[in-house]
Image (cartoon, rainbow, N blue to C red):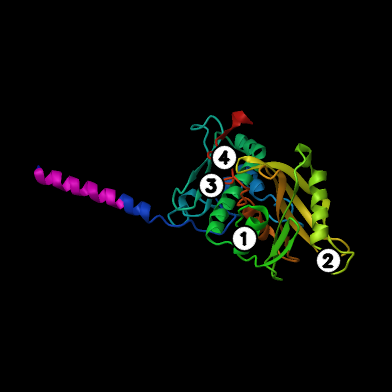
Amino acid sequence: MKNILIFSTILFCLIGMTSCDESFTMPQASGRPYEVMVVMDSTAWNGREGRALFRVLDKDVPGLPQPEQSFHISQVQPENFNHVLNIFRNIIIVDINTKTYTKTKMFFTRDLHARGQIVLTIQSPSVSEFEDFCFMHDNDIIDFLTKMEMNRLIKQLHEKYSRLCFDLAKEQFDCTYYGPDELKSYKKGKDFFWTSNNTASGLLNICMYSYPYEGPETFNKEYVLHKRDSVMAENIPGTLPSMHMATDTLCTTVKPIVVHGKYAMEARGLWYMENDGMGGPFVSHSRVDELHNKVVVIEGFVFAPEKMKRGLMRRLEGSLYTLTLPNEELSDIVTTIEEITVTASQQ
C-alpha cells in the first residue's frame, strides 16, 4: 500500500511537471500577418455557409487605389486540423448544429495552441442563421481580426522602432511615438515633421503636425481635410512651384474612433501630387492634446506604383496607435473589445 502511494505521488508530480513543461514550450503562432485559416468541412465551405464567410473575409481593404483583399484565406477539414495546423496565427472555427445551439454566437480565445494566436469560434443552429450573422456582422469580424494583427505589430514596434521618429515626436510635440524602424530620412517644419524610408521599393512616410483646437466643430471632414491640404501644400512641395501634395476628397472618408480611451478622428483615402503623376493611399488620426489645447495629427502615406499596398499601409496604420499624447498612457490593445460575444438576438 505504501509503495502504491509513493508511486501515485511520483506519477502526480510527473504529470504536473509535464503540464508545466508543455505550457513553457508552447510554440509561437505560425503564418504571415493577415492570413486566416478556416476550419470547416469542405462540403460546407463550398456551400452557402462557406460562401457567406468567404465573402466577408474576401472584402477589399478600404482606401486603396486598387482592389486588395483583406486577408489571405485558407480552409482545412476538421479531421485534418492537427498539431501542425493548429498553431496558425488566425483561426476561425465554424460549428453549425441544430441540436446543440439555439442562437448564433461568436467568441474568441487567445493562445489556445500557440503563443500570439487568436481562435475565433462561430456557433450557429442553422445555415440560414449563419448566413444572416455573416451579413450583419461582416465588419465586426474584419475589424476584430485586423486589430488583432495591429496589436501584434504594436508589440513588435516597442521592441524595434525608429529612434528618429521617437525623438522628433518628443522634441516637437511632447508626445511618444514608435514608428517603423526603416524610417530614416526626415524634414522639419513649423509644428510639422515628415519621415520616410526614402526607398524606391515602396516609399513609406509618416507625417505629424498640429494646429489650435477650436472646439467640436474642428472634427468634420471639410475642416480636417482643409487643414491637411494647407499643411501638406506648405511642407511637401513637388519639383516645380506648381506642384504640391493634395487630398482626393471624393475618395476619402472620415469617421470617429477611440484611441487609448479617447475620441479621435480617422481619415482614410487617397492623396495626389497637384500637377504631377504621383499619388497613393493615406490614413491619419486627429486627436486633441488637452494639455496644450491643440489638435495633433499623425498620418501615414505610401507611394508604391505598381505594387500591392495593403501590407505597407497596415504597417503604417498600426504604428499610429502607438502615439501617446502628454499625460496619456498607451493602451495594451487597440480594440476596446476584451471579449467578443455577439448573438443573433443582438442583430
User: Looking at the picture, which amino acid does disc 1 mark?
Assistant: Asp
Residue of label 3: 332
| Relative height, residue 169 to residue 220 (above, below) | below
| Relative height, residue 203 to residue 6 (above, below) | below
Assess whether residue 11 is covered by the magenta stretch.
yes
Residue of label 2: 238
Tell me which label, 1 or 2, sits earlier in the chain.
1
Tell me which label, 3 or 1, sits earlier in the chain.
1
**CB atoms of marks 2 and 3 within 8 Å:** no
Circle on res. 337:
4
Residue mark closest to the camera, 4 vs 2: 2
Between the residue at mark 2 and the residue at mark 3, the CA separation in whole angstroms equals: 39 Å
Using the image as rendered, state which of residue 168 and residue 236 is in the foreground. 168
Tell me which label, 4 or 2, sits earlier in the chain.
2
Q: Which residues are magenta?
A: 2-18
Quadrant occupied by the N terminus: top left
Residue mark closest to the camera, 1 vs 4: 1
Residue of label 1: 167
Please tell me whether mark 2 sits on a helix, a strand or a loop: loop
User: Looking at the picture, which amino acid does disc 2 mark?
Assistant: Gly
Disc 1: CA contacts within 10 A as few (<14), some (14-19) or many (>=20)? some
